[in-house]
Image (cartoon, rainbow, N blue to C red):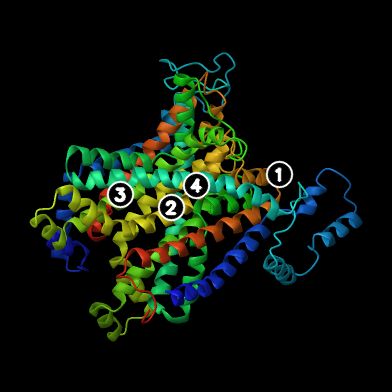
Amino acid sequence: MQRYIAIRLVSAIPTLLGVVTLVFIVMRLVPGSIVDQILANGDSSEEVQRSLRAYFGLDRPIYIQYAQYLGSLLTGDLGVSWRARFPTLVMIMYALPVTLQLASMAAIVSMVVGVGLGILSAVKENTLLDHGVRVLSLFSLSMPVFWQATMLILVLSIWAHWAPLGYVDPFTDLGKNLSLMILPALTLGTSASASVMRMTRSCLLDVLRQDYIRTAQAKGLREQAVVIRHGVRNALIPVVTIVGLQVGSLLGGSVVVESVFGIPGIGLLILNAIGMRDYPIVQGTVIVTAVLFMATNLLVDVLYGFLDPRIRYGRGA
Amino acid sequence: MTTQALEVVAPIRAPVRASRQRHWRLHVLTRNPLVLVGLALVVFFVSVAALAEVLAPADPIAMKTSSVLEPPSLAAPFGTDRFGRDVLSRAMFGARASLFVGVGSIAIAATFGTVIGLLSGYFGGPIDNVLGRIMDVFFTFPSLILAIAISAALGLGIQNALLAIAITYWPVFGRLVRSTTIAERSKDYVLAARVLGASGLRIMRAHLLPNGLSPIVVQVTVAISQAIIIESSLSYLGLGTQPPTPSWGTMINEGRTFLDSAPWISVFAGLAMMGAVLGFNFLGDGLRDILDPRSRSF
């Protein structure tokens, strides 16, 4: 197992290099440099332009710029925000826990709702309930998360005269924090639960057709015990993968949800940065999210080995 | 079921059996109500998008100060927005923007991804290694965040949103086609073709591509539905289609300010989008059952 983790970590290096290179290329696609933007409506003599270009390192050849960029990344330097004049890393460190809280709460919602409905749907296969849950999951897959959020706000503000918008730090007031975060987490979580539900259902159906399930039934176990102890435990393994992959859509979805509910996480940070053309922030945020996503998937693969002793990674491990 | 299923995915080239196969598919098509509903929804939205000029009751951009934020009525079934524009007409033209980006981006992504996947799967070795690595890099990004970053870098606008989604989605097709190509590559009929002297290009075009087409078709349908959602998310965030051009995402965003007084703007724009996305999802799900029974998700 250790060997497997080591191999995975080493093989992640080229991918990581690819990630930062892609981000570098994408950011160089930006039409007009920071210099043009700074000088957009002001003094733009040749000399000022030249000194500004030198200041931002834009006068050097592209491969030198790339090497410098890689060098600074290696030392954990993600640059300085062009607008806030704050180190990008610090700004991300402030926003990241907020997004992580939102994403974790949403992941819990999607697990509970998705696995629960998936089991229900599989056990009651081809009944009205099953069809209902399946159609519901397709509806949920077809509803963009920002519209779902907007409709939730609409319904709550009309019927309950309550529109929980904004954010409070959990260390200041945990109760208030949770009351503000529960709605965004529910929105994001239910939208992610559809694929968890579908995966749970199809895996459980596969498992329930196995011989050992028939054996368990034949020896007179209660149906509930068969489904939970023999079925669900074996069916959940592939579901873990889906939940791991969900982290990507949870992080992406949180950009939208944060913007709807006004939560100052990574999503709002990147959107504001795009609005103000603050590219070091955009660049840093994208890299951090990608690394986070990579790390989660590695974790999921490792978890797999623990959950299912049949899976052994590496030779002779 | 199993034998029929195998028959569908097996590479069948004789015309007689092919026609029987088609007959069987049609039969399944009529038995599967979800596909029909999906197909009907897709045809409906494509027609609305194509014929928006003819069908829309009003100009989607023309402002009318005499009828601002009016609730749904016979004259304006979906109500009007803050500039007095007809929400129904805007939703109809919005279908055009969303489908243009959804279908266009996936067409580019599927074409490019298929070519890369074929090359990667057929040649294997270092080519596969390099291309596989490049695809891995794209999979490392959450798709919406990558699309946001690319469209922010390319600049705002509908064409750039289309390009951003295409760049985000091509590896999905690359990986899919690569795996089907590897599965087909070592089959007897491919070996036979090679023995007969067929070139690599011919084998890929005439054998590997047609036999790996079913999963691509399914993936295209599902990807279009996701692309429509990403386009509307980009537009909602102000990065995609730019006002005053109507798009479902911008309409929902504009309607958000008037949620208390004029909820119909966001509600109807969202319902329209959900209808279109649902159509492609139903269609994709049903097609998967018919064309690719082994990878059924439920």
Rendered location of residue A202, percent (x, y):
25, 53
Which one is nearer the viewer's eye here, B160 or B153? B153
Q: Earlier in the sequence, mark 2 or mark 1?
A: 2
* Marks 2 and 1, how far apart at CA: 30 Å
Q: Are marks 4 and 1 on the same chain?
A: yes
Question: Label 4 lies in what chain?
Answer: A
* Cα distance between the residues tagged 3 and 2: 13 Å
How far apart are the two marked residues, 1 and 3, measured between alpha carbons? 40 Å
What residue sits right under mark 1 in the picture? A276
Look at the numbered disc 4 and give the secondary structure of its residue. helix
Image quarter hosting the N terminus of chain A: bottom left
Chain to which the residue tagged by mark 2 belongs: A
Tell which circle, 3 or 4, labels the residue nearer the N-terminal end. Answer: 4
Q: Are marks 2 and 1 in contact (CB under 8 Å)?
A: no
Badge 4 is on which residue?
A: A103
Q: Residue at label 2?
A: A246
Q: Kindly indicate whether the residues beneath marks 3 and 2 are on one polypeptide chain.
A: yes
Work out whether disc 1 and disc 3 sit on a shared chain: yes
Residue B254: x and y in percent read 56, 29
Please tell me which of labels 1 and 3 falls first in the chain. 3
In contact (CB < 8 Å): disc 4 and disc 1: no
